[in-house]
Image: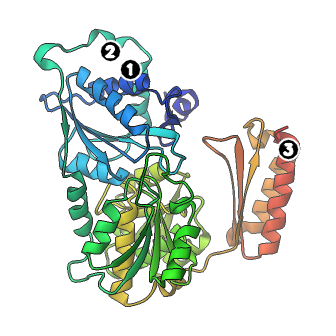
Amino acid sequence: MGSSEYNMTRKLFGTDGIRGVANVDPMTGEMAMQIGRAIAHLFKDVKGQHRIVVGKDTRLSGYMLETALASGICSMGADVWLVGPLPTPGIAFITTSMRANAGVVISASHNPFYDNGIKIFSRDGFKLPDEMEQRIEELIFSDHLDSLRPTAGAIGKAHRIEDAVGRYVVFLKNTFPNDLTLDGLRIALDCANGAAYRVAPTVFEELGAEVIPAGIEPDGQNINALCGSLHPEVVTRLVLTEKADIGIALDGDADRIVFVDRYGKQVDGDHILAICGLQMLSEARLKKRTVVTTMMSNMGLEQAIRRAGGKVVRTQVGDRYVVEEMVRGKYNLGGEPSGHTVFLDYNTTCDGILTALQVLAIMQRKEKPLDELAKVMQPLPQVLYNVEVREKKALSEIPEIDHKIREIEQILKDSGRLLIRYSGTEPLLRIMVEGEDEKKIHEMAMELVEGVKKHLGAS
C-alpha cells in the first residue's frame, strides 16, 4: 500500500500523530495502552536493549495518557523512561542522546487543553514515516499482540529521568556561539503555559538576557489559553509596555515560535528562514545553498535567497514533509511560514527555543535589531481564504472551477502563485493567491471563493 492509499484508510494517525479530545476515542487510556504495547513490540531491539522515552506537555490529561502508555510499554517487556513536561524537540533530543529505541510525546501542540495527542519519534529522533504508523495501526486493530505477554522477570520497568530539563537546557545553550552572550538584551517571552515554561526562561537568562516572562504558570487547563504563539498580542503588549528588544511566543509544545520586533510588529517564519538562510549562506554553512520550505511560503523568500546565490526547494504543507525532504536531499535548514523551523545541524525536528537562539545570535553578531534584519526579504502581497465545504471533491471534476484555476495561473505565470488544497483535518478548502498587485490577487481569490461556495459550499 502506498502512502497516499494509507492516508485514505488510516484510522488513528493524522498528519501529525494521533490527536483528539482527551478521554474520547481514540485519546483514551485504553487506546494509549494499546499504542504503548504496539510501540514496544515494533521497536524491540534484537540485542535486548529496549527503552522507550515518554514525555508530555502540561495538559491535565497528560497524567492519564502517560500512565496508560507506560503500562502498555512495560507489559511488552520494554522499559519506559518518563521525562515529564518537556518540549517536543526536547523529547526528540533525549531519545537520541540516551540511545533509546523510540520516543513518545503526549501533546496536542497548539490545541486547547481538553484535546491531547500522541507523536512518536524513532531512535534517530525523526517522526515516523507513514509505513511505520500503518504497522502500529495493524498491531492495534489485530489480535497479534494478545498472545505476546511477557511474564515474571521479563516485564518492563519504569524510570523517571529527573534531570531531563537540565540536559535539554545544556544542549540548547551549546547551540549558541561560544563567543557571544545575550548580555544587555531584554526579551519578552510567552511560554503559553506549556511545555517550555521552565526550559525557555532558564536558557535565555543563563546566556545573559533579561527575561520578562508570561505564560509560565501552567495549571493543566490554561495551556494555549489566550497566550502563546496563537495569541501574539500578549507578547506584543509585553514588548511595548516593557520596552523589550524582542518578543518571543511559543506554542504549547514549543516546536513553533512567533517573533515580535521592538516595535510590536510580527516577524513570520518566512522572514526567519530568510534571515538565517542568508547568514548561513554568507558563512558557507547552508548545505547545497538550499532552504527547504512548503508551498505556503511567500515568493519573497525565494527571491531573497536566489539573489544571494541560493535556492529554495518546496514541499507539501506540514513540517514532517519539510524534514523528510531535508533528510532526503541532505539539507540543513527548513521551515514553514507558521513558525516551524528546523536546523538539522542541531536537532531532528522543529524547535522554537533553538530557533530563537539562532536569530538572537545573528542579532548579537551583526549588532542589529530584528526589524533591521527582517528587511532582507520583501514579501509579495498574499491573500488566503478558508472556505467550508460539504465534500472534498476533485476540483478538476468541476468545469467552472477548473477553468477559473487555469485562467488565474495563466495570468500570474512567473510573477505570482495560486495554491489550492483541502485541509487534512477540517472540512475546508484553502485558497492562497500571491502576486505583485494586491487588488488583482484579492479579486482572483474572491472569484474562486464564490465558485467553491456555489458548487461545494456547506449548507
Picture residue at 39% right of the left edge, 39% below the top: 62
Depth check, front residue: 16 or 344: 16
Comes first in the chain, label 2 or label 3: 2
What numbered label is drawn on residue 139?
A: 1
Depth check, front residue: 429 or 67: 67
Q: Nearer the viewer, mark 3 or mark 1?
A: 1
Which residue is labeled 3 in the image?
399
* Residue 196 seen from this side: yes
**Residue 231 appears at what percent x and percent y?**
57, 62
Q: Residue furthest top?
A: 147
Q: Is residue 166 left or right of residue 370?
A: left
- Quadrant location of the C terminus in the rendered image: top right
Q: Type of residue at label 2? A: Leu
Q: Is residue 6 left or right of residue 125?
A: right
**Residue 405 appears at what percent x and percent y?**
78, 54
Label 2 with label 3: CB-CB less than 8 Å = no
Q: Type of residue at label 1? A: Leu
Helix, strand or loop at mark 2: helix
Label 1 with label 2: CB-CB less than 8 Å = yes
The residues bearing labels 1 and 2 have C-alpha atoms spaced at a distance of 7 Å
Picture residue at 65% right of the left edge, 41% below the top: 426
Quarter of the rendering containing residue 78: top left
Q: Is residue 5 left or right of residue 104?
A: right
Comes first in the chain, label 3 or label 1: 1
**Residue 186 appears at what percent x and percent y?**
39, 81
Which residue is labeled 2 in the image?
145
Q: Residues within 10 Å of mark 3 (few under 14, many from 20)?
A: few
Can you say whether 220 is above or below 277 in the image? above
